[in-house]
Image (cartoon, helix red, strand yellow):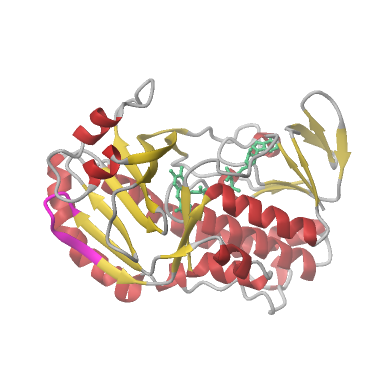
């Protein structure tokens, strides 16, 4: 297997932090990667939701680890190389046909299967389907960093403020935070600390102070979404997965990308032809990713709520969250890729 990565070095301390739940961790466990990822992570079992008025909107205890995105990439890349994968950085796929991928600046590579794990702006998605939708601005932008200001130990907190949402996660050497700001258009540049802190001036809790005591800034991200979803995932020995097939935004996207990869490996292991394996893969993954896309949309809506919708959210969320935490969320976190069970071809299992 060869992995081609567009950037020269996507690992290291790039990006911000990412959280993996039980479902993502279980998928990593199936392929022997969990311990190495856990070693780079911090465990934050308590999820706490608050409103800017200081009201508790929800609380749940579940296995969750948080780590820097770059550390996740670095760890998985190392394990893939140990398992015999060839990783080539600085090569961007620009086209593919007949089992041959073409890269920017020339050069081609042939393979039985070309997998586009190339993110929300996937090039392979439009190769597979030239009419595939293009992502659009989701009405939310985000910026974050590492702060010297402490927060509640062991708790991953989401505070839905009057003007923006603040996510915080304590680590051994400070607090990781990310502000998610609704706006009709994202600002041209990243606002300064005081301007950002002012967004949380009317809210209770440490949000403004986290920003003021930031020691390391993470890049601003403009959230994108594809509300209609991606109709076509594969054709002629080419497949998209992860954000390329179902961009989720913040929440479960990385977890699902890991699940996708493991389920694909299982289908290729068990189903005799590549075409039939891809059909089986889609059959296994569509229902789950469709369901998760609905949740991702609702999560985004909760963060871009105007004043009236925000009031409603603060009233409804405790009830909805309690129900979700008690039983409704099981489908999300209890999902198991069932690595040891043989995957039947698609035609045999409809
Ligand atoms: C602010 C924010 C917070 C988030 N927090 C969480 C979280 O806590 N938990 C969670 O589960 N998810 C989270 N997500 C979602 C998660 O980041 C994505 O769902 C996940 O990274 C998708 O993984 P992927 O491998 O499909 O794509 P990506 O992570 O986007 O990786 C795609 C890779 O392909 C490379 N590439 C792109 N084009 C080409 C090309 N043409 N040729 C070669 N290489 C190419 C890119 O350089 C990149 O390395 C968050 C997202 C955002 C924006």
User: In front here: 72 or 338?
Assistant: 72
**Range of magenta residues:** 51-58
Q: Position of residue 127 (x, y in %)?
A: 70, 35
Q: Position of residue 94 (x, y in %)?
A: 73, 30
Q: Is residue 205 magenta?
A: no
Above or below residue 88? Residue 130 is above
Q: Is residue 56 magenta?
A: yes
**Residue depicted at 29% across the width and 49% down the height:** 149
Left or right, 51 with respect to 291, comes to left
Count of marks, rendered view = 0
**Residue depicted at 26% across the width and 65% down the height:** 321
Quarter location, residue 129: top right
Q: Position of residue 107 (x, y in %)?
A: 86, 30
Q: Position of residue 9 (x, y in %)?
A: 67, 38
**Residue depicted at 45% across the width and 59% down the height:** 291
**Residue depicted at 72% across the width and 77% down the height:** 342
Quarter location, residue 217: top left
Above or below residue 172? Residue 304 is above
Ligand 1 falls in which quarter?
Answer: top right
């Amino acid at each position: 297997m060869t992995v081609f990565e567009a950037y020269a070095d996507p690992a290291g301390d790039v990006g911000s932090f990412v959280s993996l739940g039980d479902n993502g961790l279980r998928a990593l466990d199936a392929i022997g990667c969990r311990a190495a990822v856990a070693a780079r992570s911090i465990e934050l079992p308590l999820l706490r939701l608050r409103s800017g008025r200081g009201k508790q909107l929800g609380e749940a205890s579940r296995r969750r680890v948080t780590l820097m995105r770059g550390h996740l990439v670095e760890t998985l890349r190392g394990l893939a190389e140990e398992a015999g994968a060839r990783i080539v950085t600085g090569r961007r796929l620009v086209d593919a046909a007949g089992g041959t991928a073409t890269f920017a600046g020339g050069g081609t590579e042939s393979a039985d299967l070309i997998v586009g794990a190339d993110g929300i702006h996937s090039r392979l998605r439009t190769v597979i389907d030239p009419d595939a939708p293009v992502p659009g601005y989701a009405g939310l932008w985000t910026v974050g960093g590492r702060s010297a200001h402490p927060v509640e130990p062991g708790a991953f907190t989401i505070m839905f403020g009057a003007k923006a949402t603040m996510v915080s996660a304590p680590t051994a050497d400070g607090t990781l935070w990310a502000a998610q700001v609704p706006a009709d258009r994202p600002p041209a540049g990243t606002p300064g600390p005081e301007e950002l802190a002012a967004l949380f001036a009317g809210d209770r809790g440490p949000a403004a102070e986290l920003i003021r005591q930031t020691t390391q800034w993470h890049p601003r991200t403009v959230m994108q979404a594809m509300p209609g979803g991606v109709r076509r995932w594969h054709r002629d020995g080419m497949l998209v997965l992860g954000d390329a097939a179902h961009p989720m935004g913040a929440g479960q996207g990385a977890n699902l990308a890991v699940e996708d990869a493991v389920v694909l490996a299982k289908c290729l292991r068990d189903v005799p032809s590549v075409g039939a394996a891809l059909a089986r893969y889609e059959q296994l993954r569509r229902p789950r990713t469709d369901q998760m896309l609905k949740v991702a949309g609702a999560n985004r809506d909760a963060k871009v709520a105007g004043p009236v919708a925000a009031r409603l959210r603060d009233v409804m969320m405790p009830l909805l969250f309690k129900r979700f935490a008690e039983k409704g969320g099981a489908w999300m976190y209890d999902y198991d890729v069932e690595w040891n069970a043989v995957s039947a071809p698609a035609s045999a299992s409809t």
